Image (spheres, rainbow, N blue to C red):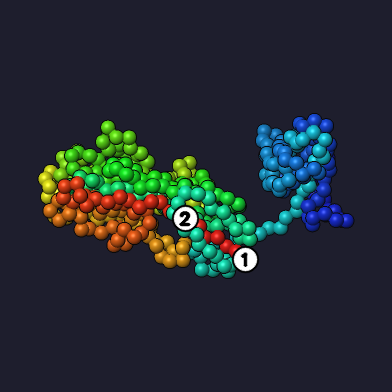
Amino acid sequence: MAINSFPSQAGGGQANLNYIGSVHMETFNRSWTQGGGAGYYALYSTNQENGYAYFVGTGTSTGAPLNRLISVTHAFTRVDIIAPQNDMISLYKAEVKSTAVFPNPFDADNTIGKLAVPSFPTIIRSSGNFVLPNNALPLINVLVNGAGAQGGHHHCGGGGGGGAVVKLTAYQAVGTTAVSIGSPSGDSNHAGGRTYFGNVYALGGGGGGYHGSHNPASATNTGNASQAINTEVGNGGGAGGHNNSNHRFGGSGFTQTASTGLGLTGTPIYVGGFSGGNSSGSDTQQSGGAGGGGAGGNGTNGDNSNPGSGGPGHSSDISGTNLGFGAGGPGGRSNNNNNQSFGNFGSPSNYGHGGRGAGSGQSGHSGGDSGTVIVRYYIP
């Protein structure tokens, strides 16, 4: 008999969860000839065992684990069940009321219907685990920031790229989540490390180029071919000065997608993918290195008068204080070293920033900053 409409069952049970029938698992794989229309269904194990079932229709089917409510969007003529032998599996159909979405209460930019629940930030700067408190809601807001890259180490060095930023809103988290904090690159041309929160990651920045025909690390070029360089960088490094015309281009950034680190849950937002500046000066020590790209914009070019500034970082108040993430590092120039600023924050105190490019000789360059994860959780 097909399931279409029926009255709610009296005499106990969850309201509007209507009992249809039960089957005995004589073997672990049973096919139940039971038809029904589209709707919400649940198959429950009497022994509370794990299992799986398929609602099979004409040319289509919907699979679901046992002991869960599932939306079946098509008619079906049978239910195929995989469960432990001698269990009993019961089918229910749910009657549900229509609802509408209201403004996301976890969204920091939402001013209407904002969640009026005390929240607490955790800033994580070393690899380990984030453990959600037992009394917290299972939904959190997260910011993931990759590590910044080192600036070019030879004179007229380009600035290192800042780490990319990934933001998650109302991300489902229960129990323990592994965290891996990206390390800044230890050599020019190399990318900063990725930072992971579970399976979600944010890319590190690209290292700055430098004098001697060395390209910056980039999403599209591999820099000095003799070095093993990670080419997937969140924001490209700046080009080094005192280079010929083939090596004056800043590194490009890489835009992450659902299949490259973002995933699909928590309404992920990617901030990054910007390029380092170019070196537009002559092939002399007067030529300034360019600024590295930041999570909020491109680095500026270097020329015969000045090195370039780093690209701006991304500003967020997820910690409760407005902080900068992923600013690009400034370039250097031999005769006035590296007096330009880090992105739009004026100092390397922001998180995940790129390093400063070298000025005279091989001095004055600096490393980038390590990655960061900030979690805001809610306890009613």
Q: Nearer the viewer, residue 139 or 13?
A: 139
Q: Is residue 159 visible?
A: no
Instruction: Please provide percent x and percent y for residue 292.
Output: 28, 50
**Few, some or many residues within 10 Å of mark 1 (<14, 14–19, 20+):** few
Asked whether the beta carbons under mark 2 and mark 1 sit within 8 Å of each other, the answer is: no
Name which residue lies at 46% across and 66% down.
Answer: 320
Sequence-wise, which precedes: disc 2 or disc 1? 2
Horizontal and vertical percent position of residue 271: 40, 53
Q: Position of residue 378 (x, y in %)?
A: 57, 62
Residue type (three-letter) at the residue carrying disc 2: Ile
For the point 22% across and 39% down, the residue is: 214
Q: Which mark is residue 124?
A: 2
Residue 346 circle label = none
> Which residue appears at 46% of the width and 63% of the height?
319
267 lies left or right of 41: left
Identify which residue, 259 or 190, lies in the foreground.
Answer: 190
Q: Secondary structure at mark 2?
A: strand
Q: Mark on residue 380? A: 1
Q: Residue at x 72, y 38 (%)?
A: 51
Q: What amino acid is at disc 1? A: Pro
Number of residues whose C-alpha sits closer than 10 Å to that of mark 2, classed few (under 14), some (14–19) or many (20 or more): some
Between the C-alphas of marks 2 and 1, the distance is: 23 Å
Say how many tags the image has: 2
- Look at the image and tell me in which quarter the C terminus lies: bottom right
Q: Residue 101's image quarter?
A: bottom right
What element does badge 1 sit on? Answer: loop
